[in-house]
Image (cartoon, rainbow, N blue to C red):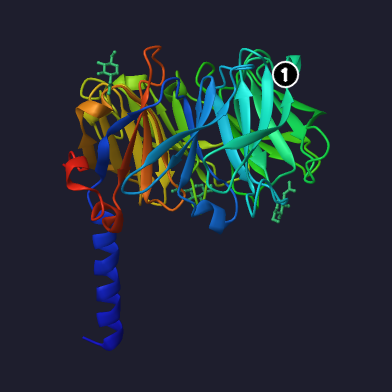
Amino acid sequence: MSACALVLTIALSVIVRASAAPLTAIGEGMRAPGARRVAFSNGAPAARASSLAYVASGDVLRSIALGAAPELNTIADVSDVGPCESVFAYESGKRGLGDDARTRLAVTCARANAFLIYAVRADGKSAERLFALTGVNRIARPRDVVVVNDTLAFVASGTHARVVALKLDPSEKAEPSLLASTFQLSGADALELGPSSRQTIRVLSGGVRRVTTLKYTPAGTLQLVGSVKDSRLQGTSGSCVGVGSSERTFTYIVSPVYGGTFAIFNSTQYGAPEYLSGIHADGKNLGFAESPGIYEELRDAKDVSVHENDAYISAKSIGAILVVDITNPSEPVMREKLQSASLVGVDRIVVSPNGAFVVAVVNATSDDGASVVIATSDDAVIDKIPKRRKLFQL
Ligand SMILES: *[C@@H]1O[C@H](CO)[C@@H](O)[C@H](O)[C@H]1NC(C)=O
Ligand SMILES: *[C@@H]1O[C@H](CO)[C@@H](O)[C@H](O)[C@H]1NC(C)=O
Ligand SMILES: *[C@@H]1O[C@H](CO)[C@@H](O)[C@H](O)[C@H]1NC(C)=O
């Protein structure tokens, strides 16, 4: 064997081992009443390496310090405008509270038709409100928000089925202002940022079975790139275009079609996204020509988050996090299942930008309160989990 081949073999075995570490849950889950959405910072690589996640939890905002002993902190009270359902974390060019605290949270609250911006302290343990727009009819029943750099925000209005652009002042002196630019759709439930080089966002609507790609200009003007309508998008409850440095060229969705579907749409081309592949809970009697993978685990699947070649899916009724290998996006393959009583009811799932942690929100849609379960497949973290907390590993 040549030296080169040897090096290659060693490199390959390291890669295989690293990605084969079993997903392990840290503890039984932390109570977080009202928890809905989880966000990681979308900033520069240094910000993305941060081990903080943020949770919109009804009348409060929370942070989670991730590690072998995760910690949940209430960082702000939003009860004056709450409940607030959606949160997006980004980086400001301006220093914030204290040293180099550049993390900002854009938050929307459906009852008060509110759009808020918070600055998070460097320790991640508190946040301060910078701006609050409330009673904004144009964003009525806001469902989701994304921010581009620190200059533009896009909000999906449920009432108007529109994406609405807001201008943010990078010096944080002027209030965010609504731009004239909006885009009318037939439905708008969730927004995802596309690759930044493309200046696109993707809009998901389960009600009208659509994935739409919009292009924005630096001034916030929105234009249609393409839209696909597909029955497999009916009732879509979760979607992702990839986190961290993922390419974001595919759109991944989870819907209740065929008992539970995980599907991949190819958004590589400028134009309408194209259905590429899907795996389902039902199938035996459906007579699929292309015979996709049938996995009973997908029944009642609710959400998906993708990091590199792994798609993490929340399987609500069986109480599991599924890991699907999407190395070949035309042929997704179920690889792993982390199942536990503490995951029964899991609705939301978000993987950290560095891929080290998976944050799952259990019973996010129930009024009886929700909890947050952290899982990791990082050996260095698993080794440090106190024994009594390392509850399950499949
Ligand atoms: C955001 O920042 C990137 C990198 O600096 C830049 O290329 C891009 O044009 C910016 N986008 C907008 C909308 O300002
Ligand atoms: C996605 O679409 C692009 C453009 O049509 C195509 O070149 C590429 O092969 C497609 N990817 C897959 C995995 O089919
Ligand atoms: C979530 O709610 C369901 C239904 O109420 C319940 O059976 C399950 O135990 C709850 N999950 C957790 C982890 O408490």
Q: Going by the image, does 394 lie left or right of 358? A: left
* Horizontal and vertical percent position of residue 27: 25, 37
**Residue 234 picture quarter:** top left
Judging by the rendered image, the residue that carries numbered circle 1 is 134
Q: Going by the image, does 220 lie left or right of 329? A: right
* Horizontal and vertical percent position of residue 34: 45, 20
* Horizontal and vertical percent position of residue 222: 74, 34
**Label 1 crowd (10 A; few <14 / some 14-19 / many >=20):** some
Q: Going by the image, does 181 lie left or right of 61? A: right
Image height of 244 relative to 311, above or below: below
Q: Going by the image, does 97 lie left or right of 27? A: right
**Residue 165 picture quarter:** top right
Task: Say whether residue 207 is visible.
Answer: yes
Image height of 378 relative to 103, above or below: below
Residue drawn at x 72%, y 26% is 132
Task: Say whether residue 192 is visible.
Answer: no
Nearer the observer, 77 or 12: 77
Image height of 32 relative to 158, above or below: below
Q: Quadrant of the C terminus?
A: top left
**Residue 1 picture quarter:** bottom left
The residue lying furthest to the front in this view is: 98
Total marks placed: 1
Nearer the observer, 84 or 278: 84
Residue drawn at x 22%, y 25% is 318
The amino acid on which the numbered mark 1 sits, given as a three-letter code, is Thr
Nearer the observer, 81 or 219: 81
